[in-house]
Image: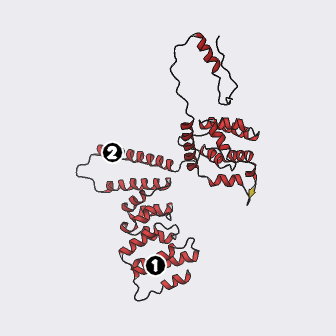
Amino acid sequence: MNNEFRELERPQAVRKKDVVLMATVTSFESLPHPSRSELRQFAELFTPLFTASSEEARREAVAALSQCPNVPPAVAFFIASQPIAIAAPFLISSSCLSDDTLIAIARTQGEAHARAIVRREALSPRVIDALVGLRHDRGIKPDADPAPASPQPAENASSEAERVAREEDMRKRLRMLAGHITRPASDRLGLRSLSAVQQALLVRFARNRENGLFASVLADALSASRWLSERIMLDISGQQLATTLKGLGMDTEDALFILQRIYDHLSGTEAGMSRAERLWNRLDEDQCGQRVEAWRRADSYTYSEPVAAPPAEAGPAQQDIEETAAPLRTTASVRQPGRYSIRRSA
């Protein structure tokens, strides 16, 4: 790589600056993990080549680097400081711009750069607060101009108070939006979650290896049939139970304990980490939640509760037969065939 950079440093007469610039960018993009020396060499080469190239080549180079995760900070600040027609893709998409860089660019380069920063997919609360404050500062600049010939202090004060109130309301809304973007892990946003009692029962039954009671509580937590919970537990790899527990938002420590108690092979360690922990870390919480909901929908289609027929006219004897034939069912019991008989009237 060093030789490639040095070769690009000696452009031939037939090679144009645009070609050299794009070759440098392409060569740098091909490095998955550039070293410090490679980053330094790229920073030294990029600025003079960029300055000597045409505007079209600059735009192509900036568009390519906006998708590169390893742009040196000096180069990133240099690109972000270019005119908005060139710097816009980089300001909107690049992950190499820190919060301090974004704030500095917004404060020094003008409103067009600030608008491009606002279009980024995710902004930290600190950057949002700085952008709102910057807008507030720019809003009060016209007040420094000479007063009109016929000033009205009372009306000006009222309009100023309304403008400040609007700015403060906008600040609160942006902070609220930022809170949704960076929500804590405990905020499940209305997803199906385990209650504290259900989580405690699952841990207790797993500790005592009472799989039947464990399946009953799991079915209750899923609002599904016991068949679904038993099917989940029959996966001896532990993948389906781990997916279910993560989709329900169970604490990591309790979930690992349950997996190791129910599936003994997950207690083994590999490279200083238990197999249960390795399995748990491979799962994505959002995907687990979607998978659990798909299982629940399929279970509801298969084991949906039948709609009760309207009561027909029947005598006392027929009602007595129906009351005797209908067993009492709970979430912790399973009806066994042949256990109940129908008493026939003489």
Q: Determine the residue positioned at 70% across, 52% down.
A: 276
Q: Position of residue 48 (x, y in %)?
A: 44, 79
The residue identified by callout 1 is 23
Where 154 falls versus 130 (above or below)? above
Direction from residue 276 to residue 320 in the image, left or right: left
In the figure, residue 113 lies in which quadrant? bottom left
Residue closer to the observer: 124 or 334:
334
Estimate how packed mark 2 is, as few (under 14), some (14 to 19) or many (20 or more) residues with alpha carbons within 10 Å: few
Residue closer to the observer: 186 or 107:
186
Q: Which image quadrant: the C terminus? A: top right
Residue closer to the observer: 31 or 115:
31
- Residue 98 shows in this picture: yes
Q: Looking at this rendering, what residue extends furthest in the front direction?
A: 346
The residue identified by callout 2 is 157
Q: Position of residue 148 (x, y in %)?
A: 25, 52
Q: Looking at this rendering, what residue extends furthest in the left direction?
A: 149
Q: Determine the residue positioned at 62% across, 44% down.
A: 244
Look at the numbered disc 2 and give the secondary structure of its residue.
helix
Look at the numbered disc 1 and give the secondary structure of its residue.
helix
Estimate how packed mark 1 is, as few (under 14), some (14 to 19) or many (20 or more) residues with alpha carbons within 10 Å: some
Q: Position of residue 241 (x, y in %)?
A: 65, 45
Q: CA distance from mark 2 to mark 1?
A: 59 Å
Q: Position of residue 203 (x, y in %)?
A: 71, 40
Where 333 falls versus 56 (above or below)? above
**Residue flagged by tag 2: what amino acid is it?**
Ala
